[in-house]
Image (tube, grey):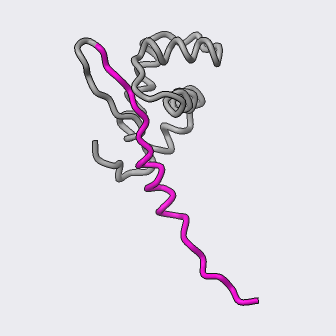
Amino acid sequence: MPIVADVGDVFKALADPTRRHILDELVERDDQTLFEICARLGTKHQFTSSRQAVSQHLELLEAAGLVRTRREGRYKFHTLDTRPLAQIAERWIRDKPQENP
């Protein structure tokens, strides 16, 4: 999946606390199925969102380039992709020249 050109999609994806929790779970362990993500959200964050709601969050994260997916049989695995975050950092974070005292 290419890196997102519009950082607005990334900011929109990061604006929702549920999506941030999903990303937190993928940081801890990549290659999770929807079922695994839902179970971890319920156990660790007491979320009671339906699998359909979590699936929609994952679709938005994927559209923003923050999640990549791969299919293996009937399972779909989700993996964090931090390249869009690096793109944002590169846009605004620059090395400042050091000032002489």
Q: Residue furthest left?
A: 73
Magenta stretch: residue 4 in it?
A: no
Residue 88 percent across, percent down from the top left: 48, 55
Picture quadrant of residue 75: top left
| Quarter the N terminus occupies | top left
Instruction: Give the vertical position of 83 relative to 28 (above or below).
Output: below
Q: Residue at x 59, y 12 (%)?
A: 42
The magenta region covers 75-101
Instruction: Give the vertical position of 99 relative to 69 (above or below).
Output: below
Instruction: Give the vertical position of 65 relative to 46 (above or below).
Output: below
Q: Residue at x 47, y 62 (%)?
A: 90
Task: Determine whether, in the image, residue 71 is placed left or right of residue 26.
Answer: left
Residue 29 percent across, percent down from the top left: 49, 27
Q: Residue at x 46, y 44 (%)?
A: 10
| Quarter the C terminus occupies | bottom right
Q: 15 or 24: which is nearer to us?
A: 24
